[in-house]
Amino acid sequence: MRAAIEGLPRADGYELIVQPLRYRSAPHLAAYTVFDDKTITLQIPEPFYPFGEVVHFGAKRLAAKGMRFVPLSEGVTFRTRAEVARFLYCHEWYHWYLYEVLHKNSSAETACDRFALHNYRRRVVTIEDARRALRRART
């Protein structure tokens, strides 16, 4: 499974743990980063079947009275374990990047989803891609 994340940036000083996710009704995305233990854990659904997930990557303000927003999302179909591993790693790596490199609050779920969504299928992802994600710029 570690070969699946080749070409993605490394979370220096953190241990990567890959474990099965035993789900009850349907496969889903699950991963977490523990900053105190310096671990990133990816949970890959087992048994694996292709599945879809709606990824919320932002919000758009509506022209209406008050502050009204509509969520921006994209449906993604994960066909292989490697796709799931790459997506989850990109997401959790971005938490690491925000916390360890930029010294910011790491709970920016939509920013992490946006980074993962834009980059998990790319062969090589760099720090510059992470900087671009902060500016919401796409290549």
Image: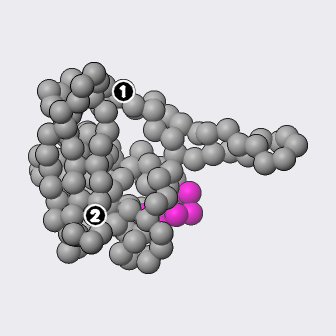
Question: Left or right: 25 with respect to 99?
Answer: left
Label 1 belongs to which residue? 52
Q: Secondary structure at mark 2?
A: strand
Is the C-beta separation of discs 2 and 1 under 8 Å? no
Residue 8, quarter of picture: bottom left
Residue 17 shows in the view: yes
- Magenta stretch mostly in which secondary structure? helix
Q: Amino acid at mark 2?
A: Val
Q: Is the residue marked by circle 1 packed among few (<14), some (14-19), or many (20+) residues within 10 Å?
A: some
Picture coordinates of residue 125, whole percent (x, y):
32, 58
Residue 62, quarter of picture: top right
Q: Residue at x 84, y 47 (%)?
A: 66
Q: Residue at x 43, y 65 (%)?
A: 106
Which region is colored magenta? Answer: 130-137
Q: Residue at x 46, y 38 (%)?
A: 55
Badge 2 or badge 1: first in the primary sequence: 2
Picture coordinates of residue 81, whole percent (x, y):
19, 36
Q: Quote the CA–CA distance across marks 2 and 1.
A: 26 Å
Magenta span contains residue 131: yes
Magenta span contains residue 39: no
* Residue placed most toward the observer, 6 or 63: 63
Residue 122 shows in the view: no
Picture coordinates of residue 57, whole percent (x, y):
52, 45
Question: Left or right: 57 with respect to 52?
Answer: right
Q: Secondary structure at mark 1?
A: strand
Q: Is the residue marked by circle 2 packed among few (<14), some (14-19), or many (20+) residues within 10 Å?
A: few
- In the rendered image of this protein, does residue 122 appear above or below residue 81? below
* Residue placed most toward the observer, 138 or 94: 94
Label 2 belongs to which residue? 34
